[in-house]
Amino acid sequence: MKRSKELVEKRKDFVIDYVKRNQNKQMKVIVTELMEMLFLSERTIYNIIQG
């Protein structure tokens, strides 16, 4: 199933904003929280962050 470009951008913005708001935590903890919230793989989250 293809995702709409708008949803992909919203997801990307959310992930980046979440990382910025939680900079005091270790990256592994942030990624684990995002994985649980968004049901994304660790690799997908790191790709968004590095994006």
Image (tube, grey):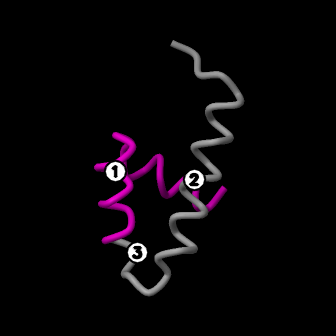
Q: Earlier in the sequence, mark 2 or mark 1?
A: 2
Q: Position of residue 45 (x, y in %)?
A: 47, 53
Name which residue lies at 55% across and 53% down. Answer: 47
Magenta highlight range: 29-51
Answer whether labels 3 and 2 touch (C-beta < 8 Å): no
Q: Earlier in the sequence, mark 1 or mark 3?
A: 3
Amino acid type, mark 2: Phe
Q: CA distance from mark 1 to mark 3?
A: 12 Å
Q: Which mark is residue 27?
A: 3
Is residue 40 highlighted in magenta?
yes
Q: In the image, 21: left or right of 12? A: left
Q: Position of residue 34 (x, y in %)?
A: 38, 55
Choose top left, top right, bottom left or bottom right for residue 39.
top left
Characterize the magenta stretch by its predominant secondary structure. helix
Q: Position of residue 31 (x, y in %)?
A: 38, 62
Q: Which mark is residue 14?
A: 2
Mark 1 nearby-residue class (10 Å; few <14, some 14–19, many ≥20): some
Mark 3 nearby-residue class (10 Å; few <14, some 14–19, many ≥20): few
Choose top left, top right, bottom left or bottom right for residue 38.
top left
Above or below, 3 against 16 in this view is above
Disc 1 designates what residue?
35
**Secondary structure found at label 3:** helix
Name which residue lies at 64% across and 42% down. Answer: 10
Is residue 15 highlighted in magenta?
no
**Secondary structure found at label 2:** helix
Above or below, 4 against 36 in this view is above
